[in-house]
């Protein structure tokens, strides 16, 4: 940490302090404490160590993580400078006593107060959710930033569940995106419009911008149009999912295998539309194939089906934790299951794969209904050759 306090409660800062400044030695002999837990802190400084404070005892301080790396201190300092350059008056390591939290930086704009956290060490989704809701509870907006070094810049990126917690939603451009920061390059990287391909892989496009071209908190998020190339990667990953199921999910205790068995269905009979590109794919922590496959089984189980049946099925699967919602920075919309079912049904109607009868729907008799292991790749290709443009158009329109 860079800020401590005297026993009288006066702040002492080591922000941008030189290790050989005589003040450092003077501080070493002074009794200083952590503004959050009020236990003694010591000055750490040397040729290789950025001057900072550390708790004397390893006893856990809930307000602040003790294993603070030099990397974290440098990034925090660098972000502080960036905010200062924008005349935003950041507060370093602000303590929020009401919730016993200490933010790396606090920023007050004319509209809101932000608690900025540069998170270097993995944090469970649960812990992050609690911290975020603590901040929201006192009217402060949590703003988590991931180090740029954690993500490899590419058009398909792998994001662990820890990384996914940093994904945020842009209301203005209606998309999920990720923001990373590099203090070494003094730049931010934006991964625009994340499209889930599997549990951990996302298709995206990214831009890296020097920090002086960005003004907090408005990051330039591109209006995104899905391309044919992206569509193809999506398809490829869908088929990969199917093959992986055969390879790795053989147990009869596996909920998916059990469903297949109960319904006497072969995975190769899965119609080509299952796993279709939808915005709602972003809600489910699995391949788009998986959640849509369960809906397909529900659809084929009765002649006429209703959207309430499909929503009910998803609710049940979520309840049993067969399907899981993704955990992003902001909570998902409370009606995301309804939204997902509606989006799927709308697209199936557009593609003339289902018919509407008053409130219910039926599957349209199609050639591709006779899909099996032998003709699968051919049928898939034919379907997407025919429907690809419509699906892309619908996706970009929404
Ligand atoms: Zn403390």
Image: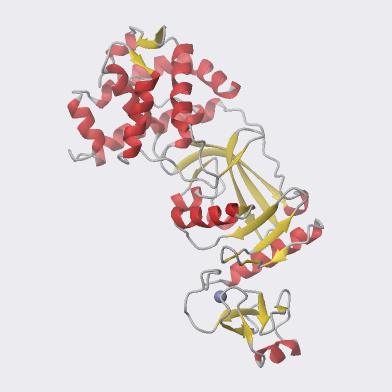
Compared with 116, 250 (above or below) is above
On the image, the x and y values in percent for residue 304 come to 32, 11
On the image, the x and y values in percent for residue 220 come to 71, 41
In the picture, the quarter occupied by the N terminus is bottom right
Residue 189 seen by the camera: yes
Residue at 50% across / 63% down in the picture? 121
Residue at 60% across / 68% down in the picture? 71
Indicate the quadrant where residue 119 lies.
bottom right
Seen in the image, is 219 located left or right of residue 149? right
Seen in the image, is 329 located left or right of residue 265? right
Compared with 243, 131 (above or below) is below
On the image, the x and y values in percent for residue 320 come to 30, 39
Residue at 66% across / 65% down in the picture? 76
Quarter holding ligand 1: bottom right
Q: Nearer the viewer, residue 15 or 223?
A: 15
Indicate the quadrant where residue 68 lies.
bottom right
């Amino acid at each position: 940490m860079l800020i401590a306090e005297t026993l009288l409660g006066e702040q002492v800062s080591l922000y941008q302090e030189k290790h050989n400044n005589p003040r450092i030695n003077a501080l070493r002999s002074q009794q200083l404490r952590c503004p959050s837990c009020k236990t003694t802190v010591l000055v750490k400084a040397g040729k290789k160590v950025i001057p900072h404070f550390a708790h004397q005892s390893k006893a856990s301080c809930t307000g602040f993580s003790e294993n603070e790396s030099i990397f974290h201190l440098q990034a925090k300092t660098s972000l502080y400078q960036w905010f200062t350059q924008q005349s935003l008056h950041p507060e370093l390591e602000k303590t929020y006593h009401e919730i016993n939290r200490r933010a790396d930086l606090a920023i007050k704009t004319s509209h809101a107060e932000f608690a900025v956290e540069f998170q270097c060490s993995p944090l469970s989704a649960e812990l992050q959710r609690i911290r975020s809701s603590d901040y929201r509870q006192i009217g402060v907006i949590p703003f988590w930033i991931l180090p740029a070094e954690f993500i490899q810049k590419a058009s398909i990126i792998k994001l662990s569940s820890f990384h996914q917690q940093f994904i945020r939603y842009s209301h203005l451009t209606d998309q999920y995106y990720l923001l990373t920061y590099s203090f070494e390059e003094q730049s931010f990287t934006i991964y625009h419009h994340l499209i889930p391909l599997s549990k951990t892989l996302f298709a995206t496009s990214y831009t890296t911008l020097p920090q002086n071209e960005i003004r907090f908190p408005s990051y330039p998020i591109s209006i995104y149009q899905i391309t044919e190339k992206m569509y193809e990667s999506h398809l490829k990953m869908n088929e990969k999912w199917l093959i992986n199921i055969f390879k790795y999910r053989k147990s009869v205790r596996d909920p998916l295998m059990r469903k297949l068995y109960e319904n006497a269905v072969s995975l190769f009979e899965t119609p080509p539309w299952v796993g279709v590109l939808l915005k709602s794919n972003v809600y489910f922590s699995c391949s788009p194939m998986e959640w849509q496959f369960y809906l397909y089984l529900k659809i084929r189980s009765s002649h006429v089906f209703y959207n309430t049946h499909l929503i009910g099925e998803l609710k049940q699967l979520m309840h049993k934790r067969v399907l899981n919602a993704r955990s992003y920075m902001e909570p998902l919309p409370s009606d995301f299951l309804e939204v997902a079912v509606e989006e799927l049904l709308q697209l199936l109607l557009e593609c003339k794969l289902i018919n509407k009868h008053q409130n219910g729907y039926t599957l349209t008799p199609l050639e591709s209904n006779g899909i099996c292991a032998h003709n699968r790749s051919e049928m898939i290709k034919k379907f997407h050759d025919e429907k690809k443009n419509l699906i892309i158009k619908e996706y970009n329109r929404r």
